[in-house]
Amino acid sequence: MPELPEVETTRRGIEPWLLGEKVTGVVVREGRLRWPVAAELAAMLGGQRVKAVERRGKYLLLRTEAGTLIIHLGMSGSLRIVPPESEPRRHDHVDIVLRKNVLRYHDPRRFGCLLWTAEAPGKHPLLRNLGAEPLEPEFGGGLLHALSCKRRGAVKNFIMDGKVVVGVGNIYASEALFAAGIHPARAACRISRHRYAGLAEAIREVLQRAIDAGGTTLRDFVGAEGDAGYFSRELLVYGREGAPCVTCGDSIRKRIIGQRSSFYCPRCQH
DNA sequence: AAATTCTCCTGAAGGC
DNA sequence: TGCCTTCAGGAGAATT
């Protein structure tokens, strides 16, 4: 499932194909996504030139003079650049047609969305209350520590809260907590500022490393052939229940925290 | 305010 | 082999 690194990799992959290009049409084959694709999207986006391809959290922003197309890939969404004559496959729900190429949105589970906003995207209800960008300087242990003071719930839920920090999904939350040696169920308010510094660094590192790994498979996001698949990750705890911890050899445990599977080493994480 | 539960949907995996 | 059940999961909305 696309987490922040996949979204950023997608952004980098499609940006060169979109920048400065004019949208000549929009084809909606299936508009029933997380929210319905607006009937007037074609009218709004058509004829517009793409000025920038940005990312905020896991949202992609295609900026034009008239407004912004906000795209979220949900759980199973992906974007590819395909030739104009390319035959759509199952679950290829939307085409953003350019003069020489097509930006094609594919999403089997339809948890994603394509929304148009004429205002500054930062004012959109979905983006307005988003927390810090984990790879920007604003994010750090100080911020986590400050926001955690009234949070009595599990730290794993805390760092997955988009109002705190964006882009930390279930997989990277487990990985970052392992790297930082923090037990996922520990109450957020009961972690020292010092340990939060380590956690912030771990989050930054695990995301950055994944983005770097994604760079080597950028071509997978572009072209008619092959799947716009997500790159494989080096996971040390996620999905490794019962397997030995890479650090101490103890067996990795799985536990449901906040309705989500969480993986951790009972010996390395406290 | 914070925490919990529910919800959307399909494909993969497991059971028999 | 095939059918049925279960589960996973981003994140907003509703509820406590």
Image (spheres, coloured by chain):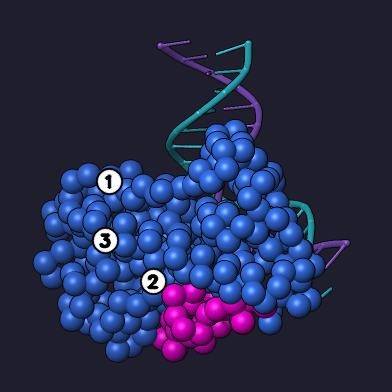
Chain colours: A blue, B cyan, C purple
* Classed neighbour count for the residue bearing mark 1: other residues with Cα under 10 Å, few (<14), some (14–19), many (≥20): few
Q: Is residue A270 magenta?
A: no
Q: In the rendered image of this protein, does residue A232 appear above or below residue A67? A: above
Q: Compute the Cα span from label 2 to label 1.
A: 20 Å
Q: Compute the Cα span from label 1 to label 3.
A: 16 Å
The residue stretch that appears in magenta: A117-145
- Of A174 and A3, nearer the camera is A174
Q: Earlier in the sequence, mark 1 or mark 3?
A: 3
Per the rendering, the mark at residue A227 is 1
Residue occupied by mark 3: A215
Q: Position of residue A8 (x, y in %)?
A: 36, 67
Residues beneath discs 1 and 3 located on the same chain: yes
Q: Earlier in the sequence, mark 3 or mark 2?
A: 2
Residue occupied by mark 2: A60
Of circles 1 and 3, the one toward us is 3
Q: In the rendered image of this protein, does residue A267 appear above or below residue A49? A: above
Label 3 secondary element: helix
* Classed neighbour count for the residue bearing mark 2: other residues with Cα under 10 Å, few (<14), some (14–19), many (≥20): many
* Three-letter code for the amino acid on which mark 3 is drawn: Gly
Residue A193 falls in image quadrant = bottom right
- Horizontal relation, residue A70 to residue A98: left or right: right
- Residue depicted at 46% across the width and 83% down the height: A137
Q: Position of residue A6 (x, y in %)?
A: 37, 60
- Residue depicted at 32% across the width and 72% down the height: A42
Q: Chain of mark 1?
A: A
Residues beneath discs 2 and 1 located on the same chain: yes
Label 2 secondary element: strand
- Of A159 and A193, nearer the camera is A193
